[in-house]
Image (cartoon, grey):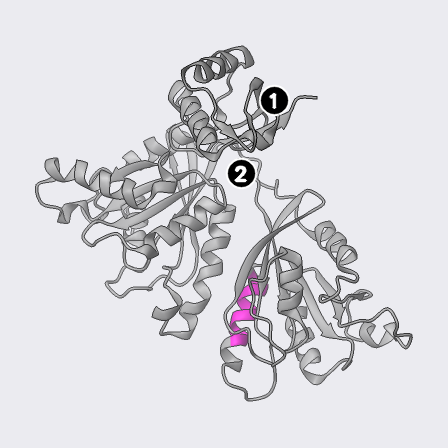
Amino acid sequence: MAKQKGIVAIVGRPNTGKSSLFNRIIQEKKAIVEDKSGVTRDRIYGHSEWLTRQFMVIDTGGITLSDQPFAQEIRIQAEIAMQEADVIIFVLDYKTGITPDDEMVAKILYRTHKPVILAVNKYDHHTNDYQGYEYLSLGFDEPILISSTHGIGIGDLLDKVVHQLPTGEEKTDENQTRIAIIGKPNVGKSSLVNSILGQERMIVSDVAGTTRDAVDSVIKRDGKEYVLIDTAGLRRKGKIYEDIEKYSYLRTAAAINSADIVLLILDLSVKISDQDTNIGGIAFDEKKPIIIIGNKWDLIPDKEKAINHQTEEIRAYFKYLQYAKIIFVSATEKTRVYKIFDAVDEVNNALKRKIRTSVLNEVLNKAQLLNPAPNHNGGRLKIYYGSQVQAYLPTFVMFVNDPAYVHFSYKRYLENQIRLQFGFEGVPINIIFRERK
């Protein structure tokens, strides 16, 4: 089954350099960094890798005792981030020392029962008056001195983070498949879960955003166990009206992270929007197998004519998901709902499919004869041989004359040839090019 990424939350009072540290860890300037407290209001997440371990990083707004604008909302946001996290980095400011706000954050962290790493930021090598016992008074392990601006101590910090992360291999039941159900508000996610379970497990309402949290439900079918994770509906930032809705985004991302397969639910009664494609993009970025579910099929007139049109429209909007299966269902009328499990089983079988090296190379040789690689970066790609390697997703290593000669269109062509010949429908394929020594 899929190996889950760990989740690391960065928390602390305002203006300790949390966003600078976040940017340093993910190695891009994604968070807003400004020398003014309270700039980071919404939680931001990114991805990082250290010592071959991949993990998700969450940046949060500063928690404070004072009655500042958005202070309560930021505190709720940060507490939810802590709940979702496997490891928490508690950032303090070396220049100011421990403040009452730091002590308040420490009390919140005690209640999480999560591993907490103290990072004392804005440290300068030229400073000699460091008093470590001051920070030990907070009740955590010895802090790590860092400068997120200059990169001091970041490696030591990440070493400790990776050491504290879970292995991601806790789930050992091969008969259990975790399925995340995602989509924008009011597309019928909870109705679909209720239809599958045959009970009113979720609150179903015409009000968008009724489901706030990710909820797990278990169903057994044909000797197999499926865990359905219904997630909070996602909104664009400009459409967020209730404070608590700001905090559904990470929980949905965390649900995708923990899933083996993702169901992307669309409302067929309305036009596909950029919001739909953006939500699908989260699962795509996580390299998860995705099945697209067109819901509210009962509201579509002249279904025989509509099915081709709807399929073409979905393919046009989701160009990055050409491999994904598409199923049309009605959750309210329970029409074609159980075809979802057939598709999930087919995807699971594709994930487990192993191709013999000799057969794979026959396909690769034929593909090169039919369509030789174009000239790119001063040379033409030559594939000497390839083999499938052990991985959750179907992964193929191809040994070539020079990986720099690989054009993205030719990589896509090879992926399509492999998919066509071996039936990897519904799952992403990973191709790695390596120079033959």
Direction from residue 292 to residue 408 in the image, left or right: right
- Quadrant of the drawing holding the C terminus: top right
Numbered disc 1: secondary structure:
strand
Looking at the image, the residue that sits furthest to the front is 378
Identify the magenta region: 74-83
User: Mark 1 — residue?
Assistant: 399
Above or below, 428 against 25 in this view is: above
Rendered image: mark on residue 2: 2
- Neighbour class for label 1 at 10 Å: few (<14), some, many (≥20)? some
Residue 40, percent from left and from top: 55, 73
**143 sits left or right of 267 in the view:** right
The answer to whether residue 80 is magenta is: yes
Q: x%, y% of residue 244? A: 42, 71
Q: Is residue 293 visible?
A: yes
User: Majority secondary structure of the magenta segment?
Assistant: helix
The Cα atoms of the two marked residues, 1 and 2, are separated by: 26 Å
Amino acid at dot 1: Phe
Residue at (34%, 35%) from the top-left corner? Answer: 341
Please indicate, yes or no, whether residue 337 appears anywhere in the rendered image: no
Picture quadrant where residue 301 is located: top left
Residue found at the far right of this picture: 128
